[in-house]
Amino acid sequence: MSHIRRFAAFWWDFIVGDDWVVAAGVAAGLGLSALLADRDVAAWWVLPATVVLVLVVSLRRATRRGG
Amino acid sequence: MTHGVFLFLTTFLASGVEAVEALTIVLAVGVVRGWRSPLIGVGAAALVLAVIVAVLGPALRLIPIDTLRLVVGALLLVFGLQWLRKAILRSSGYKALHDESAAFREEQELAASASTEQRAGMDWYSFTVAFKGVLLEGLEVVFIVVTFGAAQGRLPLAAAAAAAAVLAVAGFGLLVRAPLERVPENTIKFAVGLLLTSFGVFWGGEGAGVSWPGEDLAILGILAFLALVSVVLVRQLRRVRVAALPAEAGA
């Protein structure tokens, strides 16, 4: 069990990293892009805006807890 | 053409900077405990990484291109944003810059105090530390090489760029027998973070069905936009940190 847990923890750390907000934001941005593109609405702005939003939120969280 | 240049540059820089960190670990162990076992560890880890590239690369080509670009875009975005976030925190002074000589000293102290257990005719500590160091530092690079290479259908070019960087760093390491302290690691990580995030935005968007204005040229626009945003964020964070200093000192 501890091996499975360690394996899962490794992949969580590898993909999600220091802040889960980054992975969650990327998933949300891609989902919204796909939704808008599917309805023929211009969606090119969604991911750049998502990146800015994710960076601002994640950096604010990091600086408040001291890195 | 532009994609090829960016592909080479990104994988070369990402591989180089991770190789510098792996080199520090291997050198520290080798200098203190001898070279045979750590070098076997390096060889074994390199073999595992090569097998991952050889298996994952062709497997990814079986995935439909839009799905592949969505998955690759998501992975590059997650990795790129992690690199970029850390580089911004380091540039603004919120996180300490990576100090190779301090890491080297720390690793040397650990190597000197570790037990001398022999397994399979090797100094087991030296072997495992070198193996883990190279494998863990190399794994993210392997994912970058595989995803980047597969999304463009140019896996050999990505692998060649990574190999060139590793050879260059290993060559310097052999020459100087000391950690490479003068490599501007944070600047390189900043550049790699920007490149990975830009390609992640572009490919992730394409995979999600987005039509980019200017088509392929949109990458340059995304890169310039993200570079500008990052510079503004670094300046803003520096200002906030400096403004908070007198208050902290007075508290």
Image: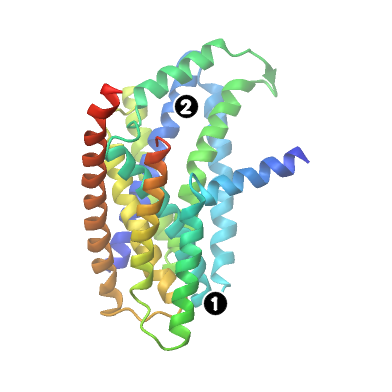
Is residue B152 or residue B35 the one in the foreground? B152
In the image, residue B79 above or below residue B17? below
Q: Residues within 10 Å of mark 1 (few under 14, many from 20)?
A: few
Is residue A33 or residue B154 the one in the foreground? A33
- Quarter of the rendering occupied by the C terminus of chain B: top left
Nearer-N-terminus badge (1/2): 2
Amino acid carrying mark 2 in the image: Val
- Left or right of A42 on screen, residue A25: right
Q: Can residue B155 be seen in this view?
A: no
Amino acid carrying mark 1 in the image: Pro
In the image, residue A55 above or below residue B130? below
- Quarter of the rendering occupied by the N terminus of chain B: bottom left
Q: Is mark 1 on a helix, strand or loop?
A: loop
Residues at marks 1 and 2 on the same chain: yes
Circle 1 is placed at which residue position? B64
Residue B42 percent across, percent down from the top left: 52, 33
Residue at 43% x, 83% y is: A37
Residue at 47% x, 70% y is: A30
Q: Comparing marks 1 and 2, which lies closer to the viewer?
A: 1
Which chain is disc 2 placed on? Answer: B
Residue B243 percent across, percent down from the top left: 22, 35
Residue B75 percent across, percent down from the top left: 48, 59
Which residue is farthest bottom? A40
Residue B93 percent across, percent down from the top left: 28, 35
- Left or right of B184 on screen, residue B171: right
Q: Are marks 1 and 2 in contact (CB under 8 Å)?
A: no
Which residue is farthest top? B113
Circle 2 is placed at which residue position? B26
